[in-house]
């Protein structure tokens, strides 16, 4: 039986852990090795580590940090940030990553997704898409690195299907760090259009939000703020899911 996952998401601004609000306001939370050690002790399903400044600064995530985190983590580790070539992905995997998350390169070179999948396999490639609403209330793609996006959300979803990526990390920028609940409509919309597991991110405020996200179509929930700033733990979220009849590993 496939189990739905609770995945802490750790954001870096190079070497420090940060938590953003709507991809703008930042709060520094210290050392990624210490943070990853805490999550390892809590027996989480997976860990996502993303350098949110890497693409904007034209560099890749620091591999020494990846190596140090992977030494602390025995759960699957997904890393992302500035990965633009197959060599970048290979270096990340050698540093200890199990999967890689690709974001900015999707807008720079849409064909790279298919190339990455063909070289490393679907199970290794996570397509990360950031979405917000425009002034008319329509969902549009957003680039944190400032890349010019030339295609629509529907075209992006078609690209993900065609590329056969292993997972989609779906983040609502408007809800990032707000702790007001996931965008259930967005989760339903995307999960109903791709034949790929969706990891919902952005907005979790309580364990029940994780339940709602999975019932809306997510295969996993990515959580940050409530783990950083409240007493809620991954186990509490998974217990809420299990109590709601959702298969999960406790």
Image (tube, rainbow, N blue to C red):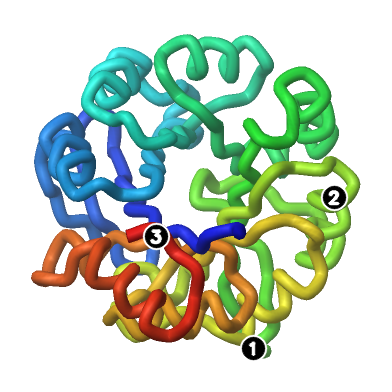
Query: In front: 116, or 96?
Result: 96
Q: Relative to 157, is 104 on the left or the right? A: left
Q: Circle 3 sits in a helix, a strand or a loop, which is it?
A: strand
* Mark closest to the chain's N terminus, 2 or 1: 1
Q: Residue at x 30, y 73 (%)?
A: 239
Mark nearest the camera among 3 and 1 is 3
Asked whether, in this view, residue 113 is left or right of residue 125, the answer is: right
How far apart, in angstroms, are the residues tagged by discs 2 and 3? 26 Å
Q: Which residue is mark 2?
A: 159
If you read the primary sequence from the N terminus, does the residue marked by circle 3 or circle 1 appear first? 3
Q: Residue furthest front?
A: 1
Kindly identify which residue carries mark 1: 137
Residue drawn at the location 56% of the way across and 26% of the way down:
83
Mark 2 and 3 residues: CB-CB less than 8 Å, in contact? no
Left or right: residue 165 compared with residue 44: right
Q: Quadrant of the N terminus?
A: bottom right
Indicate the quadrant where residue 107 lies: top right
Characterize the local packing of mark 2: few (<14), some (14-19) or many (20 or more) Cα atoms within 10 angstroms. some
Q: Position of residue 2 (x, y in %)?
A: 60, 58
């Amino acid at each position: 039986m496939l189990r739905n996952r609770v995945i802490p998401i750790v954001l870096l601004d190079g070497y420090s852990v940060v938590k953003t609000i709507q991809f703008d306001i930042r709060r520094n939370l210290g050392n990624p090795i210490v943070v990853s050690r805490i999550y390892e002790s809590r027996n989480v399903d997976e860990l996502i580590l993303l350098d949110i400044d890497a693409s904007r600064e034209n560099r890749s995530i620091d591999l020494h940090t990846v190596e140090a985190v992977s030494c602390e983590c025995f759960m699957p580790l997904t890393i992302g940030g500035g990965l633009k070539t197959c060599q970048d992905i290979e270096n990340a995997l050698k540093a200890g990553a199990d999967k890689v998350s690709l974001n900015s390169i999707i807008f720079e070179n849409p064909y790279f997704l298919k190339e990455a999948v063909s070289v490393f396999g679907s199970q290794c490639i996570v397509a990360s898409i950031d979405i917000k609403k425009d002034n008319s209330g329509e969902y549009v793609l957003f680039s944190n690195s400032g890349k010019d996006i030339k295609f629509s959300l529907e075209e992006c979803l078609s690209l993900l299907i065609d590329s056969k990526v292993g997972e989609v990390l779906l983040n609502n920028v408007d809800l990032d760090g707000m702790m007001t609940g996931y965008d259930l409509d967005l989760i339903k919309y995307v999960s109903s259009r791709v034949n790929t597991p969706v990891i919902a991110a952005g907005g979790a405020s309580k364990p029940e939000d994780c339940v709602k996200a999975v019932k809306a179509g997510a295969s996993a929930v990515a959580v940050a703020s409530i783990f950083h700033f409240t007493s809620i733990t991954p186990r509490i979220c998974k217990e809420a899911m299990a109590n709601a009849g959702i298969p999960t590993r406790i």
